Amino acid sequence: MKLPEKVLIDDVEYKIKEVSHRELQLSNEDLKGEFWGDTRYKPASIRICESMAEDEVKITLVHEIIHAILHERGFDQESDDESMVDGLAHAIRMLAKQNPELIREVLS
């Protein structure tokens, strides 16, 4: 999947970049777990692991966008809740896949 170069969240432009799995792990070594993407608020950027299947890339991008939306809306504590963000990402992805006509109408 070709990622978009950027996403506009409120008035903030987040650059989107594919990076290696190793780069994600090294830059997040102070945190626990495996990383397939991350969101940085300053500078506004989203990084996605380059070696994933297309569906994994899509769900990871939605996940990282949710982090950015929550942050830009002032929900910093919620933005740090990985379980909630992941649950929302999967729910939004399924909503879009199962209801494409609704998504076109509501979000156009």
Image (cartoon, rainbow, N blue to C red):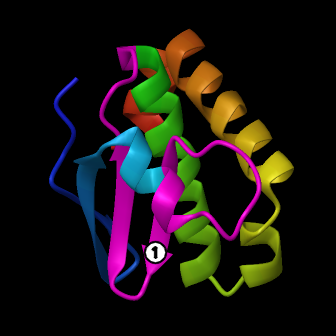
Report the span colored magenta.
Answer: 25-54
Q: Position of residue 67 (x, y in %)?
A: 60, 63
- Residue at the (67%, 87%) spot, across then down: 74
* Res 18 → quadrant: top left
Position of 86 with respect to 6 (left or right) is right
Position of 37 with respect to 70 (left or right) is left
- Residue at the (73%, 82%) spot, across then down: 76
- Residue at the (76%, 69%) spot, across then down: 80
Which residue type carries mark 1? Arg
Q: Quadrant of the N terminus?
A: top left
Position of 14 with respect to 31 (left or right) is left
Please tell me whether residue 16 belongs to the stretch shown in magenta.
no
Q: Position of residue 102 (x, y in %)?
A: 51, 25
Q: Which residue is mark 1?
A: 40
Q: Quadrant of the C terminus?
A: top left
| Residue 107 in view of the camera | no
Q: Residues within 10 Å of mark 1 (few under 14, many from 20)?
A: some
Front residue of 35/4: it is 35
Front residue of 28/56: it is 28
- Residue at the (18%, 46%) spot, across then down: 4
* Res 71 → quadrant: bottom right
Q: Compared to 22, does 30 lie above or below?
A: below
Label count reads 1
| Residue 29 in view of the camera | yes
Q: Position of residue 37 (x, y in %)?
A: 48, 48
Q: Compared to 50, does 10 lie above or below?
A: below
Q: Position of residue 35 (x, y in %)?
A: 58, 46
Provide the secondary structure element on which disc 1 rests. Answer: strand
Front residue of 63/50: it is 50
Please tell me whether residue 53 belongs to the stretch shown in magenta.
yes
